[in-house]
Amino acid sequence: MIRSMKQLAIAALVCAPALLAAQAVPAPGLKRDINIGIEDAEKKLIALANAIPADKFSWRPSKEVRTVSEVFVHVAMENFAIPPMIGAKESPTKVADDAEKTITSKAAVIDFLTKSFAYAKNAVTAAPDAQMDANASYFGTPMSRRGILMQLALHGHEHLGQMIAYARMNSIVPPWSQ
């Protein structure tokens, strides 16, 4: 019994680094900090999407702005669109140009949003450190790849604020504020 416990302990020590590496968690630094920001937006946006009733996904405060579902889908679309700007491999999830108008059910919106955040975080993790200062184009604006990844994290938070306002207008308290 003691021998098998020792063998198990040795196997755990040998395999632990490989298991940690397989999780693709960035080392301390810029990429991890960016992913922390992305994960915060992800957690709150998905919690808010789950808290908003399905019949409110077509609600909008005025006809000139996006509906609830359109905002969530917009965030997801940008999560898919921004990483390739720094040379990331495109996601296998295909995003139609009219996704904001065609992905409307609560379940489909949450699924699309979830997939987009997974892709965005993996793209940040995979970005080569040595290329962070390289120039790229962010919707026509010259910017470093580092700057583009920072915009990726900021974008989710920009629309999180919008969704908090939408929720509050509908008497929905964000889950983390209850």
Image (cartoon, rainbow, N blue to C red):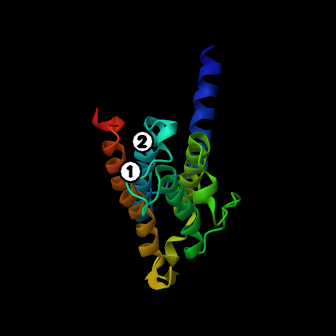
Identify the residue at image location x=42%, y=69%.
151
Q: Nearer the viewer, residue 37 or 60?
A: 60
Q: Is the residue 129 above or below the residue 6 in the image? A: below
Q: What residue type is labelled 1?
A: Met
Q: Is residue 41 left or right of residue 70?
A: left
Q: In this view, does 119 lie to the left or right of 43?
A: right
From the image, tell me which residue sits under label 1. 163
Identify the residue at image location x=55%, y=44%.
110
Circle 2 sits in a helix, a strand or a loop, which is it?
helix
Label 2–label 1 contact, CB within 8 A: yes
* Residue 74, horizontal then vertical, whole percent: 51, 60
Q: Which of 72 and 143 is in front in this view?
A: 72
Identify the residue at image location x=60%, y=74%.
87
Q: Say few, some or many: other residues with alpha carbon within 10 Å of mark 1 (under 14 / 14 to 19 / 20 or more).
A: many
- As drawn, the label of residue 48 is 2
Q: Is residue 160 left or right of residue 50?
A: left
Q: Is the residue 32 above or below the residue 2 in the image? A: below
